[in-house]
Amino acid sequence: MAIIYYARLDESWTRYQKYDFLKERKHVGHVEFQEIQPNQQHVWLTAGLHAEFATFLPMGTKEGKATRGETADVIFKIYSNGVKTNSDAYAYNHNQESLAIMAEGMVDNYMSQHDRWMRKGRPKDLENFLKIDEKILKWIRHTKRSLLSGKTVEFEAIKIRHSMYRPFCKQFYYFEDIFNEDTYHFPRIFPTLETEQENQVICVSAVGSNKSFHCLMVKIIPDLHLTGDSQCFPFYTYNEAGTGRRENITDGALQQFRERYGASGLTKWDIFYYIYALLHAPSYREKYAANLKRELPRIPFVANLATFEQFAKIGRRLAELHIHYEQQAEYPLERLENRTVPLNWRVEKMHLSADKQELIYNEFLTLQGIPAVALEYRLGNRSALEWLIEQYRFKVDPRSGIVNDPHRLDDEQYLVRLIGQVLTVSVETVRLVQEFGRFIVY
């Protein structure tokens, strides 16, 4: 039987630092190795892993997806990546009219090439056949496959939808299969505008992410990179016409929670919000950080029904904050206006001051009094405010020349207002998360 030895170095080291380390040792015999054994899940590097994690209920499994959760010991029947465009500049825009014009141009260009392809006898060699103008359409793999399959497309304005592109950064999105690399299960999660009024989705950072575990609830289509190759767990699924609504939490999971707490009135929404709260709990995130890098979250039971209900209550409030962030009150910031320049609400690129207490919005406006606690609410490597700063800026795509301008002519102070609202969300989220300090997760 083979024996595996392992030497662990600082994970932040570059490969060149590791090369230097080996040069210093000069011989493999001068490296300190330890013998390692795999665990029951066949994982070799088990440092930081907690064995009891495997006993918790999985949020989702491949087996559960294959059987729609009917026979699997799992909480959610299906889960999905966020949508993957491989052509973000073409599929997303802050301006609805600009995106509609872009989408119509993509449809016209695709159908023009499709008709020419048909006339030329459906050649297989698209690389030499296509006349590509990347100012109009990026021919991603799925677009090419669609052409080779003979698919046609018409522009439909109803397919211009909202998407949560990055945390608290909403854009218009062209939800057309042919121009997306993969929409995964989202044609069955948010098939119509109407489903956005009732469905909710917990998005978690994917397995193997190099960012710390984080999650965000949304009620519109999320991008794949919303939270770092996000995996998304919806409350409802539908058929592609938007009818045939089904709850996505399994009856088996509901029964387990009811039996555990002796509560026949406990609902699937209670479980949904309990999970969202638990995924924010520092005691859960910190203890199981290594496990969460290797597999999707598993959900333990808290001590008793009263604690479960408290978690569900906090989770419901977190969901309200995160989903309806644009309806929250603005955090009171001081507006410092530069009277030597004309009044201007447009933004090119915002930035924080060195002490992170001020946000320089543009030459005309600086927002003062940013609370330090707000920056503690982080989604991966950035705070919610830093996500806004990164995403709400004037961009010109270097490949296509497409302009993406976050300024709203019909609501010029939208972004200033949004900054205050997201700060309120951040401060309140931190406060709610601090309440978990009273509870031991497992």
Image (cartoon, rainbow, N blue to C red):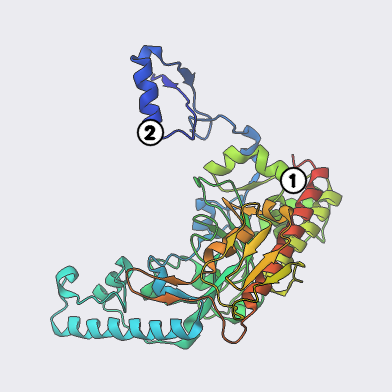
Give the position of the C terminus as an image quadrant: top right
Specify few, some or many for label 1: CA neighbours under 10 Å numbering under 14, 14-19, or 20 or more: some
Q: Which residue is mark 2?
A: 15
Q: Is residue 319 visible?
A: no
Q: Which residue is mark 1?
A: 301
> Nearer the viewer's eye, disc 1 or disc 2?
2
Q: CA distance from mark 1 to mark 2?
A: 42 Å
Q: Residue at image x 69%, y 70%?
A: 336
Q: Would you say the residues marked 1 and 2 are in contact, meaning their CB atoms lie under 8 Å apart? A: no
Q: Residue at image x 38%, y 65%?
A: 86
The residue nearer to you, when weighing 24 against 151, is 24
Q: Residue at image x 45%, y 22%?
A: 7
Residue furthest right in the image = 306
Circle nearer the N terminus (1, 2): 2
Residue furthest top in the image = 29
Q: Is residue 10 visible?
A: yes
Q: Is residue 416 left or right of residue 329?
A: left
Residue furthest front in the image = 340
Inspect the image, locate mark 2, and give the three-letter code of the amino acid beneath it.
Arg
